[in-house]
């Protein structure tokens, strides 16, 4: 029995004596590949869909592009062939080796082998004039990536890329709709949002269990200047979104002060978090903090 370390914990034990690469379809290499794909959220796009999605990036030749999770380069290749100056950030060193070989003759290709959540985005933005950000994002970290990007979106031309459909619907939801929540407020505080394409599992290898969508997020000229604590306040308001605003803040904030703020703003006492636009949330927060 050997232990496969650093691989998906569900697949950590494997009996080599009974499963060799030559003798069984359950080869250790196949299992490692599958574990790796699951761990890194690797679902690779087919050529036709990748071509269409890459064509949606409204970038001009010579502009900078930051691609998150290039995988085997399905989107990358199209973007490089358009003459874009592309930097790819990929966590999986095996993909990085594939990409280095595949694009070795491209002068406009750079690759960084790192977890994007540890990538120094600010340093990249300081060194590159208004890049586009793109990628078919790994689903397990897509909201963390988008949330981290938003406060710096004004330093980019925008984001065009793919996430799980359900996440795209939450991000692009309008107030009073069923998908509207704290993620919608966070993103729409900084971005104009639009779903571009819905993409079914059949366009990926391996097929994910969920539908996907591409979105275009461009910087709002009138982006909200969020004070410290604002987004925590919004998140708390949505923890019990069926309750009235006064009740949804629960024990985290002074309920009497919340009620007094609602009165001060002349809002109905029945008002709920899902009815408030980012601007109304900001007014509420500022009035509450005074
Ligand atoms: N762009 C390729 C395509 O569309 O075929 C691959 C997309 S696949 C859904 C996600 C990619 O992100 C994989 O290549 C995966 O290794 C990479 N990835 C996963 N987590 C990452 C992270 N934290 N930072 C950077 N890349 C990551």
Image (cartoon, rainbow, N blue to C red):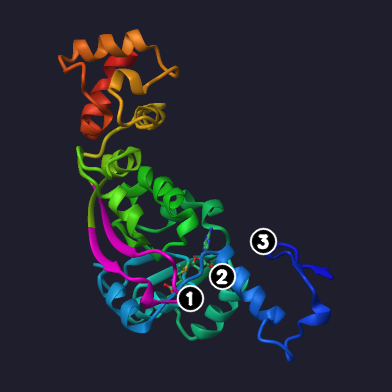
**Mark found first going from the N terminus, 2 or 3:** 3
229 sits to left or right of 262: right
Foreground mark, 3 or 1?
3
Q: Please give the name of the residue rendered at 56% of the width and 52% of the height, measured from the top-left corner.
A: 118
Pointers 2 and 1 in contact (CB under 8 A)? yes
Query: Is residue 217 part of the magenta span, yes or no?
Result: yes
Is residue 276 positioned above or below 107 on the image? above
**Mark found first going from the N terminus, 2 or 1:** 2
The magenta region covers 195-219
Residue matched to label 1: 206
Q: Please give the name of the residue rendered at 41% of the width and 78% of the height, measured from the top-left corner.
A: 74
Mark 3 → mark 1, Cα distance in angstroms? 18 Å
Residue matched to label 3: 10
125 sits to left or right of 1: left
Residue 56 in the image: state x and y as whole percent.
Answer: 25, 70
Label 3 crowd (10 A; few <14 / some 14-19 / many >=20): few
Magenta: main secondary structure: strand
Viewer-closest of 149 and 174: 174
Which label belongs to residue 177? none
Mark 2 → mark 1, Cα distance in angstroms? 9 Å
Residue matched to label 2: 37
Residue 52 in the image: state x and y as whole percent.
Answer: 27, 77
Foreground mark, 2 or 1?
1
Viewer-closest of 287 and 43: 43
User: Regarding mark 3 in the picture, which secondary structure is present there?
Assistant: helix
């Amino acid at each position: 029995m050997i232990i496969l370390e650093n691989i998906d914990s569900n697949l950590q034990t494997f009996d080599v004596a009974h499963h060799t690469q030559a003798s069984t379809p359950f080869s250790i290499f196949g299992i490692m590949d599958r574990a790796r794909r699951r761990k890194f959220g690797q679902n690779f796009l087919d050529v036709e869909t990748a071509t269409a999605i890459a064509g949606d990036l409204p970038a001009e030749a010579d502009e900078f592009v930051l691609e998150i999770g290039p995988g085997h380069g399905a989107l990358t290749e199209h973007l490089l062939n358009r003459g874009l100056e592309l930097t790819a950030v990929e966590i999986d060193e095996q993909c990085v080796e594939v990409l280095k070989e595949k694009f070795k003759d491209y002068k406009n290709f750079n690759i960084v082998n790192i977890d994007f959540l540890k990538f120094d985005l600010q340093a990249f933005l300081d060194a590159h004039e208004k890049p586009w950000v793109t990628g078919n994002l790994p689903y397990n970290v897509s909201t963390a990536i988008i949330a981290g990007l938003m406060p710096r979106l004004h330093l980019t031309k925008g984001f065009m890329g793919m996430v799980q459909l359900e996440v795209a619907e939450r991000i692009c939801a309008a107030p009073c709709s069923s998908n509207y929540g704290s993620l919608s407020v966070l993103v729409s505080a900084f971005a104009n949002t639009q779903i571009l394409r819905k993409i079914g599992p059949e366009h990926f290898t391996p097929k994910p269990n969920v539908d996907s969508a591409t979105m275009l997020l461009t910087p709002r000229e009138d982006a909200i200047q969020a004070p410290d604590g604002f987004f925590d306040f919004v998140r708390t308001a949505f923890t019990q979104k069926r309750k009235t605003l006064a009740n949804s803040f629960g024990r985290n904030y002074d309920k009497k002060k919340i009620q007094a703020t609602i009165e001060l703003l002349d809002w109905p006492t029945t008002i709920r978090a899902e009815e408030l636009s980012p601007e109304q949330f900001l007014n509420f927060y500022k009035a509450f903090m005074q």
